[in-house]
Amino acid sequence: METTSIEPSMQITFTLVSTHEEIAQIIDLQARNLAPVLSPETIASQGFLTVRHDADVLLRMNEAAPAVIAKDEGRLVGYALVMPREFAAEVPVLLPMFDMLAGLSWKGIPLRDNPRWFVMGQICVAAGYRGMGVFDGMYLKMKEVYKTKFDFTVTEIAERNTRSMRAHERVGFQELHTYPDTTTGEVWRTVVLEF
Ligand SMILES: CC(C)(COP(=O)(O)OP(=O)(O)OC[C@H]1O[C@@H](n2cnc3c(N)ncnc32)[C@H](O)[C@@H]1OP(=O)(O)O)[C@@H](O)C(=O)NCCC(=O)NCCS
């Protein structure tokens, strides 16, 4: 379970990844929130992450399209990954998602024919900083930075991650598709946020 004794300073800033140190802090925050290291109670109340990213792939992803991060006096306290579609093959566990997305349409336009969207690859807010607007702030920053090049972002949320489902609904994500992963039994909801 993730624990923190650090008190938020209330001076949280929203920016883009620009250093290797920030990538290392993303990997660290990710590692503390993966389902296998969390108790069932924490998973139910706080949410959980499924995908672990390779540090090299994360570095190259961020060079192509930097993630949005939240910082509290230099400490990374949240991240939202931007995953360009050309990186699909680099994160093999996400390939089925990209295959599935290729068969869907948004507003009548097949996703496969539309270059103006990207996958929001993963979002996490550090324990101790939840429920304070960090989540909303990261999506606002994402819109501000990426809206000229993209019309919307797509992400997937495990249906049982009810905290994440609620937070995404609150900031305006709309449902596109729901499907079960027959291997793991996880039910995934594909959602879209218009910029
Ligand atoms: C999911 C996460 C990013 C959301 O950020 P956050 O700062 O906790 O989100 P917020 O507190 O702003 O919003 C959570 C919403 O869910 C509600 N909520 C809290 N716990 C809940 C629960 N167990 N089930 C359903 N809703 C819940 C809150 O009341 C709030 O809704 P409201 O604004 O209508 O009151 C963060 O909790 C986190 O990083 N969790 C661990 C990793 C994770 O699950 N990432 C997402 C993977 S898809």
Image (spheres, rainbow, N blue to C red):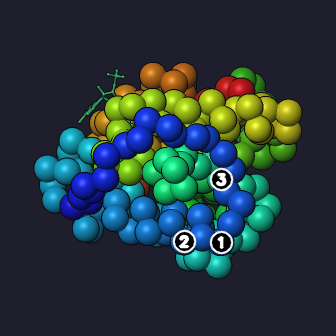
Taking 119 as reference, is 24 above or below it? below
Q: Which residue is mark 2?
A: 24
Q: Position of residue 47 (x, y in %)?
A: 31, 47
Q: What residue did someone put label 1 on? A: 20
Q: Residue at x 70, y 32 (%)?
A: 143
Query: What's the distance in space between the residues labelled 2 and 3, CA to CA?
Result: 13 Å
Which quadrant would the N terminus be assigned to in this image?
bottom left
Q: Position of residue 82 (x, y in %)?
A: 66, 52
Disc 2 residue type (three-letter) = Ala
For discs 2 and 3, the disc positioned in front in the rendered view: 2
- Residue drawn at (65%, 53%) of the image: 67
* Residue at x 31%, y 53% (from the top left corner): 6
Give the residue type that dot 1 points to: His
User: Is residue 91 shown above or below 1?
Assistant: below
- Image quadrant where residue 153 sits: top right
Residue that badge 3 annotates: 67
Type of amino acid under label 3: Ala
Choose between 148 and 153: the one closer to the eye.
Answer: 148
- Mark 2, secondary structure of its residue: helix
Residue 101 or residue 7, whichever sits in front: 7
